[in-house]
Image (cartoon, rainbow, N blue to C red):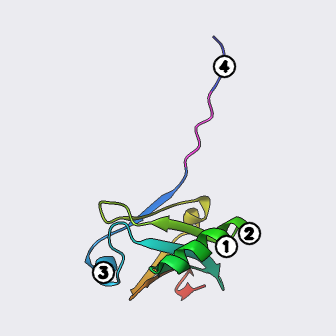
Amino acid sequence: MNGFYICRFTPELIIDGDDIIKAGFTPGAAFKIEPYQGELVITLVSAEGEIERLLLATNVYPHIGADCIRDNGELYLAENWLTEQPLAISVMPGQVVIHIQHGNMLV
């Protein structure tokens, strides 16, 4: 059989450790992913009603995403925008913000 295969690499980012656990990102926790002013904002979603509204919103707004922290405690992201490096990651209670860094400046 003659042919070829195209392998596509999707960049991955895994955030784990004490900082995200202290911020509330524990295994199974649901979170919202949304771009905001040049950043990617990841926010915990905990109430049942909030999770339902988020799932409905992801069907209407393609720029909003939802996922859960993996069972091993990892916050896992994969997408081509991750190649726009370097990235700066800020962790605060209930939220992770990823900035694209240009030179010494954050964008």
x and y, in percent, of residue 38 in the image? 64, 82
Q: Is residue 13 left or right of residue 23?
A: right
Q: Which residues are magenta?
A: 5-9
Identify residue type, mark 3: Asp
Give the label on residue 57, or none.
Answer: 1
x and y, in percent, of residue 36 in the image? 64, 83
Instruction: Give the Cα distance between marks 3 and 4.
Output: 47 Å
Image quarter where the C terminus lies is bottom right
Any magenta on residue 99?
no
Identify residue type, mark 1: Ala
Residue at x 52% of width, y 56% of height: 11
Q: Residues within 10 Å of mark 2 (few under 14, many from 20)?
A: few
Residue on which disc 3 sits = 19
Q: Nearer the viewer, residue 92 or 57?
A: 57
Label whose residue precedes the other's in the sequence (1 or 3): 3
Residue at disc 3, secondary structure: helix
- Up-down relation of residue 15 to residue 24 (above or below): above
